[in-house]
Amino acid sequence: MVLTKAYPDLKGIARRNHIPESVVFKVIERIKRSMKPVNKRMPVIENGEKHYYSVERKGIGVLNTCFGKFWQFEFYVDDT
């Protein structure tokens, strides 16, 4: 089963935010790419021994607060 979601109204978003439609498209594409999990294997030396840990970025997002915008990252570390 493939789930699809209609693309947002780029013209409406651009008009409401007073930015070009091409900029809206680029931002949405960047957000979509950032939501794909990214895996890296990291070497860590502990007590003179080298261990490898798998670190996966699960998600990313912007939090709009009264103090400004903050980026939230979600990571999973496999240290077994």
Image: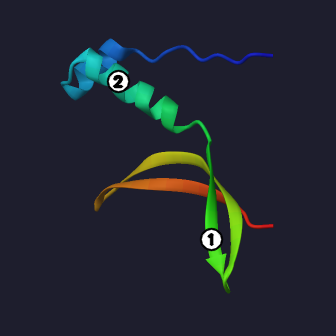
Three-letter amino acid code at disc 1? Answer: Val
- Between marks 1 and 2, how big is the CA–CA gap? 36 Å
Q: Is residue 10 above or below residue 45?
A: above
Label disc, if present, on residue 44 of the rendered structure = 1
Q: How many marks?
A: 2
Q: Position of residue 55 (x, y in %)?
A: 64, 56
Image side of residue 36 versus residue 31, left or right = right
Q: Residue at 50% of width from left, 30% of height from top?
A: 32
The C terminus - image quarter: bottom right
Q: Residue at 40% of width from left, 15% of height from top?
A: 9
Q: Around disc 1, counting alpha carbons within 10 Å, would you say few (fewer than 14), some (14 to 19), or many (20 or more)?
A: few
Q: Position of residue 60 (x, y in %)?
A: 51, 47
Q: Mark yes or no: residue 77 visible.
A: no
Q: Element at badge 1? A: strand
Q: Nearer the viewer, residue 62 or 74?
A: 74
Q: Element at badge 2? A: helix
Label disc, if present, on residue 26 of the rendered structure = 2
Q: Position of residue 44 (x, y in %)?
A: 62, 71
